[in-house]
Amino acid sequence: MEQSAFIKWVQKFLPGVTLRITKNLNDTTNPLPYLHKTLLKPVFSVDGKWETLIQENVLVSADYVAMDSDSPLKKRDSLGKASGDIAKMQMELWLNEKQLTALDSLIANGATEAQIVAVLFKDTKKVLGGAYELNEGSFLEGFSTGEVLVTDADNVGAGIYLQYGYLDDHKFGVTTAISDPTYKYWDDVKVIKEKAIADGNPIQVAYTDSDTINDIAALNQTKELYAFGQNFVGTNIPVPDLDQLNTLAKKRGGFIFVPVDRSIRREKNGDRTSYKPWKAGSIVYTTSGQVGSLVYAKLAEQNHPVSGVTYELVDGIYLISKYRKNDPAVSEYTKMQARVVPVIDSVEEIYLQDTTQIQG
């Protein structure tokens, strides 16, 4: 590896460019906002492992006691643990000989700094965005199922498996297929709501895909409850839209629906595919606020920097490096590395309903 051929621009603009890119990526008004950025808090791991404690977290009443008497001991909640190593992610892009020649010509012809920066740092946005996309995909898959499975078939490097330990008595199915208009969804929700209240975790948000929301809105029970609340008289009851459905959900269950319809693009061996990480039909009921951590660790290259490489650490997590190589031909490289995984560690506050599973 050698120093970038455009080192004066790299040294001058790399810090500001990465700051601007991350600001745009973190903007919640983006057309494709990142849910993991709002629902997970960054947590540094010294030993390179992620861990989440799982406990029953049941509140019991204190006791009144006589003055100067001993305090009665209570049973401690059972405690479990899910843990694992923090996987490494990496993405690399380059400007080839033809692109470098075009950039040289651009500079020779008196291009502005803004024009040079736009070409020289376009890959920086892609590799940082690639890190966010991977985190988002893993988080949505894990949040909607309780586990993340990335196989070798989906990934250029090694596959990973994360198991968050969702509680068995917090998992629910449906009494009838959700596509059946006679399914009484709100009866099933009442059971989930009562369980959550008994646990001291009042449900405030239900995350699910739009197709599931539309199925719920089209149910006879939903339309009848909505019509009753609107003093609607007639047989041709309209299907409520999302705002109207949320008004009903707030009244019946104390929560609102938040649609999750994110698609993630992957590339392997030059082939690009798109997938939706959220499991279709999953509804995750939880209290408002964060549900876990974005756990990260230090990279080996942070302690052992390579001569000639220009580095920039973004958000304390993502290591961006720019350098030049001449094998097999001269090229300018931009690389992102990070050791980071999304972890759901508020499992005692999560209630998962799989509407594809019919239970008695």
Image (cartoon, helix red, strand yellow):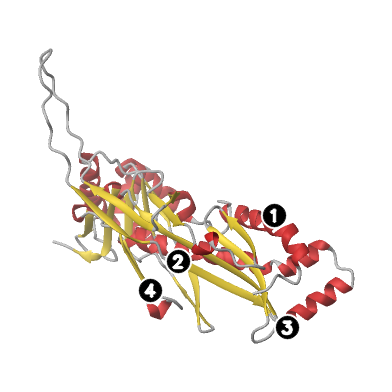
Left or right: 312, with 162 as reference point:
right
- The reply to whether discs 3 and 4 touch (Cβ–Cβ < 8 Å) is no
Label 4's element? loop
Query: Can residue 162 be seen from the camera position used here?
Result: yes
Residue type marked 1 = Gly
Q: Which is more foreground, mark 1 or mark 2?
A: 2
Instruction: Give me the C-alpha separation between circle 3 and circle 2.
Output: 30 Å
Q: Is residue 274 above or below residue 141?
A: below
Of the 4 image quadrants, the one containing the N terminus is bottom right
Residue 28, horizontal then vertical, whole percent: 55, 51
- Specify which label sits upstream in the sequence, 1 or 2: 1
- Specify which label sits upstream in the sequence, 3 or 1: 1
Badge 1, how many Cα within 10 Å: few under 14, some, many 20+? Answer: few
Residue 249, horizontal then vertical, whole percent: 35, 46
Which residue is label 4 attached to? 159
Residue shown at 75% from the left, 72% from the top: 5
Residue type marked 2 = Lys
Residue type marked 4 = Gly
Label 2's element? strand
- Specify which label sits upstream in the sequence, 3 or 4: 3
The mark found on residue 16 in the picture is 1
Left or right: 266, with 332 as reference point:
left
Left or right: 256, with 252 as reference point:
right
Of the 4 image quadrants, the one containing the C terminus is bottom left
Residue 339 vs residue 39, the one in the foreground: 339
- The reply to whether discs 1 and 2 touch (Cβ–Cβ < 8 Å) is no
Label 3's element? helix
The mark found on residue 97 in the picture is 3
Q: Which is more foreground, mark 2 or mark 4?
A: 2
- Specify which label sits upstream in the sequence, 3 or 2: 2
